[in-house]
Image: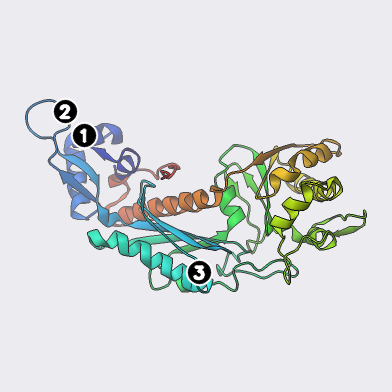
Amino acid sequence: MLTVLVHEREATRASLAESAGLSRPTAATSVSRLVAAGLVAETGERTSGRGRSTAIVRLAPQVGVALALVVAPVGVSGVVVDIHGDEIARARSVDGPHEQRLTRVAKAVLARVSRNGLVPVRCAAVSVADPVDRHTGRAVQLPDEPFLVGELDARAALADLCDDVIVDNDVNWAANTLVEEGCVGLIHLGEGLGAAIVEDGRVLRGGRGLAGEIGHIVVPGPDGTAIPFTEVFARLGLRQPGSSAVDVERLLEVTASDDSVRQALAVAVSAVVASLVGWADPSKVVVTGPWAKQVAAAVRAEVARSARPVDVVTALDDDATARGVRLAAVERLQATVLGVAVSNLGREQVGARPGRIEPATS
């Protein structure tokens, strides 16, 4: 029954009985138990027509909320979402170390939610613009790759606010929005370089969570010699001063007027595509990021000439990472609340786990 309310938001006792396949007396007993457990609330609102008011059953605020936080080089942003995926509050911080920004944003959005009473924070999902160890949740510095947000430990930073914190890198979270059947590859081209493979809606993360760190894939360099992908940008003078991060502004400026640089980048990116095709066999590869559009046509031409061509498409959705984090936060919140309900009340009072619900955008 609880799963019906996750999807439909509100219902009468009669409609809950029908949806759950229960008799009305059994449904009424179940609703009473859920009310007593603080998981649902009833109001005496009239739904339609004349006569006596019909009780409307909704999930209670006490089921809790989730945090969705994005840690990027330019700042930290966060939202609080409810179990339906609706945004309740948001905040952003651009000052101070990233760990302080993360804590500041989390506290700010929760303060806005708690104005209407204490609401439990069940879980948090955090995106980090760096490789992330799936076991510890800490950012990982790999050789000769940009360390964009520092040695961030998101779980430790949020320990006082939430016990259940899931952390992953920004490219994996963006890939989390790819729900197509089959196998799809995603390549992100920005200050940092990353990739992900999604198979039947599941992101493949590897043993440590470092799958998709493509900086050291060997590709043809500007002079045709085999070098790591990240070294291509050093050879072309497209790194930020004192860093291995790609200088996106400089890259866009140069490739707008220099076909040879654009072609060198396309050859390197197409070699990364070939690598993904070789070990994952995706049905298509999505290329995204701030300079993806600049090289997309040349990459498609190179891939079309390869031994195993694949469809290469360009996506320019800057919000994919934020949407992926919110989606994960909502799914985790739903699973947590339903797990608590099953433990306390039994599966017959709750129903099956709900399917994926896309968070509302605002």
| Three-letter amino acid code at the position of disc 1 | Ser
Pick whichever of labels 2 and 3 is earlier in the sequence.
Answer: 2
Please report contact status of discs 3 and 1: CB closer than 8 Å, yes or no.
no
Query: Callout 3: helix, strand or loop?
Result: helix
| Residue 276 shows in the view | yes
User: Which residue is nearer to you in this view: 204 or 218?
Assistant: 218
Q: For the C terminus, which image quadrant?
A: top left
Image quadrant where residue 228 sits: bottom right
Expressed as whole percent of the image width and height from the top left, the position of residue 87 reads 37, 50
- Find the distance from the CA under tag 2 to the CA under tag 1: 23 Å
- For mark 2, does the 10 Å Cα neighbourhood hold few (<14), some (14 to 19), or many (20 or more) residues? few
Numbered-mark total: 3
Badge number at residue 101: none
* Label 3: how many Cα within 10 Å (few below 14, some 14–19, many 20+): many
> Which kind of residue does numbered mark 3 sit on?
Ala
Which of 199/177 is in front? Answer: 177
Q: Quadrant of the N terminus?
A: top left
* Drawn side of residue 69 relative to residue 32, left or right: right
**Secondary structure beneath label 2:** loop
Q: Earlier in the sequence, mark 3 or mark 1?
A: 1
Amino acid residing under circle 2: Ser
Which secondary structure, mark 1? loop
Residue name at image x 57 percent, y 48 percent: 318
- Disc 1 residue crowd, few under 14, some 14–19, many 20+, Cα 10 Å: few
What residue do we see at 85% from left, 39% from top? Answer: 306
Q: Residue at x 62, y 64 (%)?
A: 130
The residue wearing badge 1 is 23
Residue under the point 84% across and 45% down: 259
The residue beneath circle 3 is 154
Q: Which residue is mark 2?
A: 48
